[in-house]
Amino acid sequence: MRCRSPIFVLGLGLLVGLAVAFWPQAMPRQGGVMPQEVYVWQRAWNEPVKQAVTQAAPEMERFTVLTAEVTWVKGQPKWTRMEPDWAALKASGKPIGLALRIGPYGGPFDRESVPTKKLVELALSTLAQAEAHGVKAAEVQLDFDCAETKLAGYRVWVEALRERVKPVPLTITALPSWLDQREFKELVRVTDGFVLQVHALQRPASVRDEVKLCDPLKALAAVELAAQAGVPFKVALPTYSYVTAFNRESRFIGASAEGPAKEWPSDVITRELAANPQELAMLVRDWTQQRPAMLQGIIWYRLPVSTDRWNWDWPMLAQVKLGKVPEAQWQVVTRSPEPGLVEVLLANAGTTKSAPQQTVRVQWPKGRLVAGDSLSGNELSEPSALMAEFKPQKDTRTIAPGETRLLGWLRFDSSVEVHSELVAK
């Protein structure tokens, strides 16, 4: 894992200081540990999802659960309901927010229109469904792909829904691009709060472009600007990864995340774009020290599940949410189950899963190597008569904290004592 440079750390602090000193309107500020929540955005509630909720419950203040997704057909809403495991949510003992995901819609926005009435119907039926299973909703949250030019129209929806779902709070998600729109303050002031989403896939022009899921400096600036609305809000931070794809001319052609891995053509160049745990841990640390008083907490997207290959694992999130940078810590282990046979293993004694990037070198003062083999995505090489190396390849799998993996074995013509070490790849 790359180390954070002192310049970057200083940059975060300087930006906060400058924002506080030169912002046009002085804002109340506060420090201390913030409440932290997590989205459960999985559409299929299988056993790993239920286990993940149970695991996260002691560490999270709230779960916000995707309950329905709305698409539009000839201007009319069509929705798909999710089937959360309400018993697992109730057993968590945590407040439960109900999220309604609404796809792109350009209007018209009218309080008495069919789309508005249908969305109200969906919100009320979702609340009733939760209550029927013994879950009292902590909020209804709208996640709407609203164009910046349509915020005034969106306010019509929000006012109608908020009136009907009372006393349950109504919140919305918001994008940084909305913050400098004149209608933004009017929109969020008819809500009970909002979630500022500071993560998104920025379309790279080519494979050489350096893009981030969440730019920490932009996130800090967006939080300062959002606080000017005078409405309590939370900030959503990412835990996931994308695979971006480029053609032979290095031009961006698509991306994939969640679900089964997409099969790209053989001549496509792929590159993983992942949430950076170092940078996000620093954001948590900075906001814990000081932040706008309107910033009420952090909500992570999305819940770590053991089968989700494009997301952090739980040990990673558990560290980052505390402002700590998780790291893998590698230890080489050798054992001799019988004379002349040496097995080489690699253990992760750290706090997060990772794919090892270092070569394991094994040396012996005397004896002759007569056979050997590698496992687990490693290549065995013999640079000299008294040394062998296990080199990780591109398909080397991650090793979880506390896990030990057999890299391979060496067979000698007699019993030998070996020395092992990690060296740069």
Image (spheres, rainbow, N blue to C red):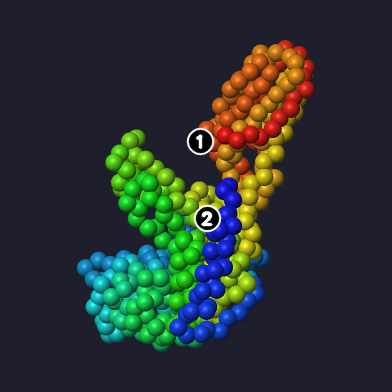
Return the residue nearer the eye: 104 or 148: 148
Corner quadrant of residue 108:
bottom left
Residue 295 against residue 397 in the figure, above or below: below
Image quadrant of residue 135? bottom right
Q: Nearer the viewer, residue 361 or 412?
A: 361
Residue drawn at x 34%, y 39% is 268
- Residue 41 vs 266, above or below: the answer is below
Q: Position of residue 20 (x, y in %)?
A: 53, 78
Inspect the image, locate mark 2, and give the three-letter code of the amino acid beneath it.
Asn
Disc on the earlier residue, 2 or 1 = 2
Q: Residue at x 41, y 61 (%)?
A: 200
Residue placed under numbered mark 2 in the picture: 276
Relative placement, left or right, of 315 versus 105 is: right
Q: Which mark is residue 330?
A: none
Mark 2–mark 1 contact, CB under 8 Å?
Answer: no
Kind of residue at disc 1: Asp
**Which residue is more in the foreground, 77 or 225?**
225
Tell me how far mark 2 sits from mark 1, CA to CA. 21 Å
Q: Which residue is mark 1?
A: 395
Q: Residue furthest left?
A: 74
Residue 85 left/right relative to 247:
right
As rendered, which of 271 and 3 lies closer to the eye? 3
Horizontal and vertical percent position of residue 256: 39, 50
Q: Quadrant of the C terminus?
A: top right
- Tell me residue 138's x, y (percent): 53, 77
User: In this orientation, does residue 328 appear?
Assistant: yes
Percent x, y of residue 282: 58, 62
Label 1: which secondary element? loop
Label 2 neighbourhood size at 10 Å, few (<14), some (14-19), many (20+)? Answer: some
Q: Circle 2 — which element? A: loop
